[in-house]
Amino acid sequence: MAAQELDRVASLPGAPSYSYAFKHYSGYVTTDERLGKALFYWFFEAMEKPDEKPLVLWLNGGPGCSSVGFGQAQELGPFLVKKDVPELELNPYAWNQGKCKRRLTSANLLFLDSPAGVGFSYTNTSFEIDPPGDNSTAHGSYAFLVRWFQRFPQHKMKEFYIAGESYAGHYIPQLANVIVEENKKASKENYINFKGILIGNAYVDGDTDLQGIVDSAWHHAIISDTLYSAFLKSCDFSIEILSPECDAALSEFFLLYKLIDVYSLYTPYCDLGYPALNASASSNIGQTNGRVSTLQLQNVIDFSCTQFDLLKMPMGFDPCTQTYATEYLNRADVQRALHANTTGLPYPYVLCRNSINAVWKDSDMTVVPIVKKLAEEGLRIWIFSGDTDARIPTTSTRYTLKKLDLPIKEDWLPWFTHKQVGGWSVVYDGLTFVTVRGAGHMVPTSLPEQALELFKHFLANHNLPSKPF
């Protein structure tokens, strides 16, 4: 327990004085001594009765984006970054919430920057020698969990869930599969009490995601009938290499998409962007350089999302929270308080590190078979989708779910937050799909109350409210 106490955050710059009704810890867990890999985490106990609450690991996507900088600081964590100073405010819709009417339960929250090189996590081995990828990320995250539970043994036998969004649609099923397989042969000391996964706007399947992006763009009146017809005529997203005609259509598509925010179609940009960064990135959006594979196309789209939109992506009521989070986490006093950057990293903290995306060595075109296997293993699986996201639109997710070919138990019912429709849901045999009406790619930021309602019902394994209340 001594190592655990060394990670305890005693005070945090800018945090409200009344915020310490719960304990929180942050620091590093070494996952590979030979390669010098250490992953950074930030852990928050539940606000009430943490010993009785489950543990939830949150993962953001990218690849290359920070769960600490996105999930904790802008979405569902207890401390949200405010403008001007920047300082912190207590999140009234944090997922480690205490008591509140109708709230079914809460959780202990664990945010992880993964793989090594993301956020404050680091590696002493160059990406040229040891490039990151899906497989190494899953096994690295598993190694982190085993060692983290050794540091925090009081949480070891709690119900454990993994939640996240975007490229975590790959991370989470792959990590879940590693846990399931390792549990079959694990000793009592290394067994993880794993119960389920919750993924939002998930990148799961390459061809259905890309087809859904195009179809959704037409339905939202972003592209013309002529361009849409060109896609229908020349693009087959199920093949590895796209045709030159399809590539030309995609180039025009990207030029249109850089005018708006692909993560949140109907909200404004932040006006605090950095012109040099934006200009540099915008010159690359729309360039697919001839024939491209669907994996290369994924990287082109992610480039536009993680660099061009890095400081301009709408975040709910305030579209500039990425700017505030970046500034806050680069403060030396904040890093000292969080036991972060203890080795003196030769680069500043960034929310998304594009060099990781650029060298990503393996990305499964689909993880549908893994999701189906996890459903057969009896894990609780919920997939949710903000329906104004154009990066992984609801259309894409619905196409992907068709590939699972699961029997429907309850078909397309509305669910409510108070007296308003929060979205719609479908309960399959082995999986629940939920839309969130009016939310973008980052649902907890766009509509935090609806996101919390969804999360609580997932933990309780209850269907969402089907009537106004």
Image: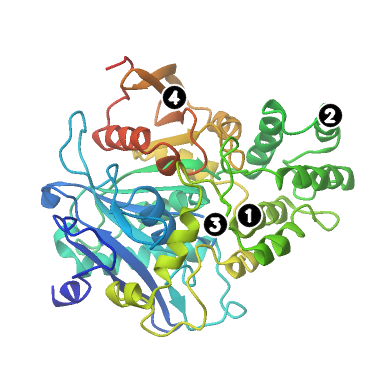
Within 10 Å of the Cα at label 2, are there few (<14), some (14-19), or many (20+) other Cα atoms? few
Q: Is mark 4 on a helix, strand or loop?
A: strand
Q: Identify residue type, mark 3.
A: Gly
Task: Identify the mark nearer the N-term, 4 or 2.
Answer: 2
Q: Is residue 145 above or below residue 349?
A: above
Report the front residue among 387 and 375: 387
Q: Mark 2 points at which residue?
A: 229
Circles 3 and 1: CB atoms closer than 8 Å: yes
Q: Which of marks 4 and 2 is in front?
A: 4
Name which residue lies at 39% across and 73% down: 331
Task: Identify the mark nearer the N-term, 2 or 3.
Answer: 3
The quadrant of the picture occupied by the N terminus is bottom left
Report the front residue among 115 and 195: 115
- Determine whether, in the image, residue 41 is placed left or right of residue 326: left
Q: Mark 1 points at which residue?
A: 302
Q: Identify residue type, mark 1.
A: Asp
